[in-house]
Amino acid sequence: MTQPETPPPSARQREHQANERTFLAWLRTAIALIGFGFAIARFGLFLQQFQATFESSQTPISSFLTSETLGVGLAIAGIIIIALALWNYNRVYHQIEQARYQPNRLLVWLTGGLVIVLGVLSLPLILLRQPTFKPPSNASPVEVPMDGNYIPFVWRKKRGKKPRLHR
């Protein structure tokens, strides 16, 4: 015996499911932006600590456009996108229920513009970043065996001992 076929979902049900898929896509995008923002901000802190390890004097960060600022901006953009996605989902839900759906491209343009602005703001960080790693003057190269996990040599600070003359 064969099972009776289930009736196809109604058009309204398909529209609601499409609305939910769209909302989840916006949510996924927002979570990715928040994650990238967190990673960029933390990586910037890592680079500052790495630089401070090898330089005796701290260079003050005077620029507003840093990786921390970009990371926070991406996280804020992700939060804004979540709020806009919730608003859009609710608006479309009510329009579907009242059978008067009107597409609105404003949300797409706002989000696209926001991502373009953040992308343009990240360009100076990428293009104008000068290599800042200089081994300290009191460092000596130390050979490390190559087994695929190490760089060919590392810089190690001398322990503050004055070199002794051998007679």
Image (tube, rainbow, N blue to C red):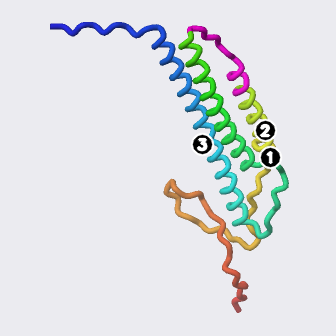
Q: Mark 2 — residue?
A: 121
First in residue order: circle 1 vs circle 2? 1
According to the picture, the residue beneath numbered tag 1 turns out to be 65
What residue is shown at x 62% (from left), y 23% (from top)? 88
Q: What element carries label 3?
A: helix
Q: Distance between the residues labelled 1 and 2?
A: 8 Å
Q: In this view, does 81 lie above or below 165?
A: above
Residue at 52%, 56% (x, y): give it.
149
Label 2 sits on what residue type?
Leu
The three-letter code of the residue at mark 3 reads Gly
Q: Which residue is drawn at 74% across and 36% down?
A: 118
Image location of residue 85, percent across then percent down: 61, 28
Location of residue 158 with respect to 11 vertically, above or below: below
Q: Which SS class for mark 2?
A: helix
Task: Kindly identify which numbered label has been placed on residue 86.
Answer: none
Callout 1 touching callout 2 (CB < 8 Å): yes
Q: Name the residue under label 3.
A: 35
Magenta stretch?
A: 99-111
Using the numbered discs, state the Cα–Cα distance from disc 2 to disc 3 in whole angstroms: 18 Å
- Horizontally, residue 35 falls left or right of residue 157, namely left
Query: How far from the left and from the top, in percent, is residue 36?
Result: 62, 41
Q: In which quarter of the image is residue 120?
A: top right
Q: Which of marks 3 and 1 is nearer the N terminus?
A: 3
